[in-house]
Amino acid sequence: MSDKTDERTPAWRNVLLRVVISTAAGLLIYFSGPPRTLWWLAPIGFAILGAVIYGARARAGFGYTLCAGLGFTVPLLAWTGEFVGVVAWLPLALLEAALMGLAGAAISVVSVLRAWPVWAALVWVAGEYLRSIFPFGGFPWARIAFTQPDGVFLPLATVGGTPLIGLAVALTGFGLTMLVRTLLLDRRPRRIVAPALAVVLPVVAAFGALPLVGTDANDGEATVAVVQGNVPRAGLDFNAQRRAVLDNHVARTEQLAQDVRAGKVDQPDLVIWPENSSDIDPYRNPDAWARIDDAARAIKAPIAVGSVLLGDDGLPRNTILLWDPQRGPIEQYTKRKLQPFGETMPMRSFFRLFTSAVDRAGQFVPGEKAVSFRMGDATVGFATCYEVAFDGVVRESVEGTNLLAVPTNNATFGYTEMTYQQLAMDRVRAVEHGRAVAVAATSGVSAFVRPDGSVSQSTGMFVPGALVETVPLRTTTTLSDQLGPVPEWIMVLAGLGAVGVAIAARRRARTSN
């Protein structure tokens, strides 16, 4: 008995070591993202993960990548548990990590193929696609592209969007895996060329895409103001502070109007308020209508007002209203992509068996189409808060516009990294679609993002503020917009095809043996 135990011990130690290394790889990927600017840690994380799962069985690939996924998603999504505890945070992180584990299993399977880094990177993109649509409409928050707003790979967004950035990072990392293996095990020059190319070509491609990132104001300019009124207190009781939040945004807009009259800032052509800046329905509350009207008249510019409206069915809609200083509300955009377990509650009766907290989730009704607002010379498209994480939603919002606005409410998540993670998405979208982005947050961080993804101005967190900037208006259609989801579909099909070929090759090998 003791001899068998002694034989098992080294194996278990090896497994434990791989678990620790895989988890560390996931942590490196997490630390590569905002608010840090350590983007280069992401390909290193992939390189380490690749070293663990290359040549492993599928179930080992699943398990080790699950550990890497937990190292990535547990800290990344900690904001989801800021005020409701682990009931949302840890299950969500585990689910996302498990889906990453499926990709890891497939990456292990394709290690029998030549050019493994290429197929492994394509499989990773396929896994990201799965996570962006499943379950409950998908949760693409952990896309690798969103760790890269300060990295060399960002220009690739203008060519192929977030999937191409993810492919480049993963390919570089897995290429590093094979390069190191080759240098250690087989130093023949011809063996080194292929993995070296896998490392170098994504970087070269990114620099090659730089000239395609446009920043010119080809449709004129507009002076835009974003208002951050702040909230009385951080946390879930935000909704109990609705009138105070509205008053804060009115007061900060009126102060901005005073600054304009005093010559301290330029007169804005349009103003963006955050999501939920008026959770009091102005159509049903004349007092709220009057307060918003006062603000619009004071600033002498149209305001995009984040509001919650009740429909005839008695259910709420998360909307943006175009409020004209003379005519009041004249246009409406209703948020299309709602946040599960927040604005909606999927499988409410089932989850109620485990916790009564499900009844805190809303019953919001989604909008049906993208709507742009004509505000002076600007045609503004909207991606409200959670929507900015979804490729297709933003693509539809940008069509026919020359400016993108992202009204958001991050007050519920306190001083966590959530707002910086979302700002990273805004920066990637700016390059992907060639638009300046105006970000208005109730409690921060509000910002202006240039079409090249750089942040020109930003506010602090949980402070009132207003930013005014003259931004370029651009109607250019990027290559990413022209191609739409097609590059991602090709990558997904190629990755799945590689898995199929690898499985067939393994079966043939077993049969011949």
Image: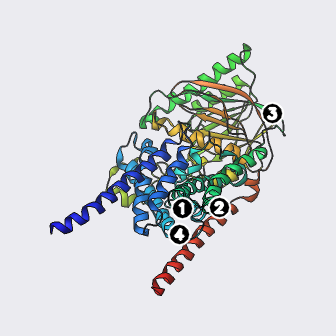
Q: Mark 3 points at which residue?
A: 221
Mark 4 or mark 3, which is nearer to you? 4
In terms of sequence position, does the residue under pointer 1 or pointer 4 come before the other? 4
Q: Earlier in the sequence, mark 3 or mark 1?
A: 1
Three-letter code for the amino acid on which mark 2 is drawn: Glu
- Estimate the spatial distance between the alpha carbons at disc 4 and disc 2, rounded to whole Å: 19 Å
Q: Is mark 4 on a helix, strand or loop?
A: helix
* Residue to which mark 4 is pinned: 110
Q: Is residue 73 left or right of residue 208?
A: left
SS state under label 1 = loop
Amino acid type shown at disc 1: Asp
Is 458 placed left or right of 484 in the picture? left
Q: Residue 255, how many percent across, how many down?
A: 64, 19
Quarter of the image where one finds residue 121: bottom right
Q: Distance between the residues labelled 3 and 2?
A: 33 Å
Would you call the spot at circle 4 few (<14 residues within 10 Å), some (14-19), or many (20 or more)? Answer: many
Quadrant of the image containing the C terminus: bottom left
Pair 1/4: label in front? 1
Which element is circle 3 on?
Answer: strand
What residue type is disc 3 on? Glu
Q: Name the residue under label 1.
A: 186
Percent coordinates x, y for residue 68 in the rendering:
43, 53
